[in-house]
Amino acid sequence: MSSDLGRMDTLAHQVMENPWDEISAGIDSLVRNKADAREVKKRLADHTWCGLLVALIQLIEKINKTVELLTDTAKQFITDALSRRFDSGLPRLVTDAVIRLVVDKVWSALARLLEAHFPLLGTDTLRVLRMLAIFTCPSVEHHPEVYKHAVRPLMRDGHEIITDEIKTHVVTLFSAWWRRRAPEALA
């Protein structure tokens, strides 16, 4: 999927919509009384789905932190191994810088391959899970985990995506537009 909307649609169908028939049938078999089963299903809409999505977000964040720790350890191991065997004939500082450059570039390529072939741990999946958590939450203002693990990270992403140059350009364009159309809006 090339867009967040496409990824979100796919994830929502696979994780929430497709399993619903089996979940519903399972509830019906666990709770024999139809009225009680219907009530259980209604209660699932009250923060169960967004809570589940936040738990997935937290799990992926923990896995990613572990991978980062292992990455640092692995990169250091590879750097040390290359340092022992690589003799460039240049001063040691230059040799070390070359080795770090090579390891960083190769590791970056490996990380891109990992994300391409195992995208569950990628930033795109986290962003989509965060969006889904917000969209499925019946009241974000009463669900602090959704705010902490979905809303705030998405707001940070938005601030990072929109550069100062774009912000300045938009303010300039809209200020001029408002001066022409509704000067009282600028007062």
Image (spheres, helix red, strand yellow):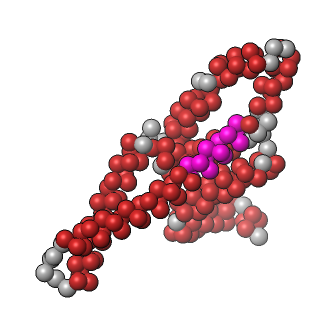
Question: Mainly helix, strand or loop, the magenta region?
Answer: helix
State yes or no: residue 59 in magenta. Answer: yes
Is the N terminus in the top left, top right, bottom left or bottom right quadrant? top left
Write down the quadrant of residue 51 in the picture: top right
Count up the numbered dots: 0
140 over 105 or under it: above or below: above
Residue positioned 74% across, 37% down in the render: 48
Is 63 on the left-hand or right-hand side of 100?
Answer: right
Is 82 on the left-hand or right-hand side of 24?
Answer: left
Report the front residue among 89 and 108: 89
Write down the quadrant of residue 55 in the picture: top right
Report the front residue among 151 and 94: 94
Is the C terminus in the top left, top right, bottom left or bottom right quadrant? bottom right
Is 113 on the left-hand or right-hand side of 15?
Answer: left
Where residue 34 appears, as percent x and y from the top left, is 83, 14
Where residue 185 appears, as percent x and y from the top left, is 75, 63
Residue positioned 49% across, 47% down in the render: 121
Where residue 167 appears, as percent x and y from the top left, is 57, 66
Residue positioned 66% across, 53% down in the render: 149
State yes or no: residue 74 in magenta. Answer: no
134 over 22 or under it: above or below: below
Quick check: can you spot residue 89?
A: yes
Report the front residue among 41 and 82: 82
Residue positioned 35% across, 59% down in the render: 108
Where residue 182 appears, as percent x and y from the top left, is 72, 61
Residue extending farthest left: 89
Range of the magenta residues?
A: 49-61
Quick check: can you spot residue 131?
A: no
